[in-house]
Image: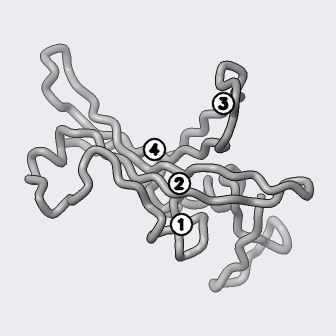
Amino acid sequence: MKTLTAVALAGLLLAAPSALSAQTPGRTADRSQDSAAENDTVPQYWRSHHSVQVGGQTVDYDATVGSIILRDEHQKPTGKMYYTSYERSGVQDESHRPITFSYNGGPGSSSFWLHMGIMGPRRVSTPDTEHTDPAPYKVTDN
C-alpha cells in the first residue's frame, strides 16, 4: 500500500521525554495484538498532554499523532496519511477555535523541521538563519 506522509510522526517529540509515559493510545491500546492487515486498514492515533509558556501564561495543549486511511469508491484502502495536531486544552467555545493547516513533504527531516523549526508549540532554538551547529539542540517554547 502506498504511504503518503503529510507530517512526520517525529512531531510528537516536541515535548519532554516523559511525554511518552503520558500517551493515550487510540483505536488500538495493545498494538502487539493487531494483525498487519488490520494496522493497514484501521486509523490509529496517540495523544499526549503538554504545556508551554506563551506571553507569560501557561498554555495547556494536547499533541496527537495519527493516521488517516484513504479509500476508493469501494472502500478499499488505497493509501495512508499521517498527521500531527496540537489543540489547546480547556477551550469552552470550539466553534471559534482558529485552525492552521501546514503541509510539507517527507518522509523524515523535512517534516520534522516544519514542527521543530517553525510551526510546533516547541522549537529548536537557533542563533541565526544561516548556519546551525550540530546536535544537541536546545528546545524552547515557541
Name the element at disc 4: strand
Q: Amino acid at mark 2?
A: Ser
Q: Position of residue 41 (x, y in %)?
A: 17, 38
Judged from the image, the secondary structure of the residue bearing numbered disc 1 is helix
- Residue at 69% in and 52% down: 60
The residue labelled by disc 2 is 111
Q: Residue at x 78, y 72 (%)?
A: 126
Visible residue check, residue 108: no
For label 3, the residue is: 99
* Residue at disc 2, secondary structure: helix
Does 135 sit above or below residue 20?
below
Q: CA distance from mark 1 to mark 2?
A: 12 Å
Please tell me whether residue 71 is drawn above or below residue 104 in the rendered image.
Answer: above
Up/down of 66 relative to 48, above or below = above
Which residue position holds label 4? 83
Asked whether residue 36 is in view, the answer is yes
- Amino acid type at circle 1 is Leu
* Residues at marks 3 and 2, CA–CA distance in whole angstroms: 19 Å
Q: Is residue 49 left or right of residue 57?
A: left
Mark 4–mark 2 distance (CA, rounded to whole Å): 10 Å
Image location of residue 108, percent across then percent down: 45, 61
- Which residue is depicted at the point 65% across and 25% down? 94
Residue type at numbered disc 4: Tyr
Question: Mark 4 and 1 residues: CB-CB less than 8 Å, in contact?
Answer: no
Q: Which residue is identified by label 1?
A: 13
